[in-house]
Image (tube, grey):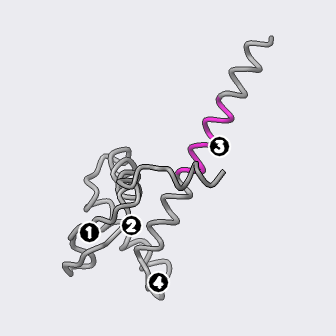
Amino acid sequence: MCRIFAGQDPANYACHTRSLRLAGHVTSIRLEAKFWEILDEIAEEQGMTTPKFLSLLYDEVMEINPEMHNFASLLRVSCLNYTLDRAGVMERARGELAAAAAE
């Protein structure tokens, strides 16, 4: 089983830093490439650029939880939640298709 994870393309976990403006301040966020891919996808689905999406998300998080100190970790967990949710949606859709085909 470990080969599934150990043998993956190193480009997936190569770190990339992007600069953006959050709450009026220029900052940078360092994440693994795969997380940036997911964030780009989420932003596109929302009809925004990734920097705009991250800025809006940051503002909303700070409104809800001003004690949040690790935005990069929040982004990683958000990507995981998004991915798990999409997987659930896909599984439910496959189940519905299988049920419809059986009728």
In which quarter of the view is residue 16 placed? bottom left
The residue at 65%/43% (across/down) is 88
Is residue 87 within the magenta segment?
Answer: yes
User: What is the secondary structure assignment of the residue under circle 3?
Assistant: helix
Query: At which x and y percent is residue 68?
Result: 47, 83
Q: What separation in Å lies between label 3 and label 4 (alpha carbons)?
A: 28 Å
Q: Going from the N terminus, do you reach mark 2 or mark 1 first? A: 1
The amino acid on which the numbered mark 3 sits, given as a three-letter code, is: Gly
Badge 3: few (under 14), some or many (20 or more) residues near its Cα, within 10 Å?
Answer: few
**Label 2 close to label 1 by CB (< 8 Å):** no
Magenta range? 83-93
Q: What separation in Å lies between label 2 and label 3 (alpha carbons)?
A: 23 Å
Q: Which of 45 and 11 is in front in this view?
A: 11
Q: Disc 2 marks which residue?
A: 57
In the drawing, does residue 6 fall left or right of residue 16? right
Q: What separation in Å lies between label 4 and label 2 (alpha carbons)?
A: 12 Å
Q: Going from the N terminus, do you reach mark 4 or mark 2 first? A: 2
Q: Disc 3 marks which residue?
A: 88
Front: mark 3 or 4? 3
Query: At which x and y percent is residue 55?
Result: 30, 68
In the drawing, does residue 20 fall left or right of residue 7? left
The amino acid on which the numbered mark 2 sits, given as a three-letter code, is: Leu
Q: Disc 1 marks which residue?
A: 17
Q: Disc 4 marks which residue?
A: 68
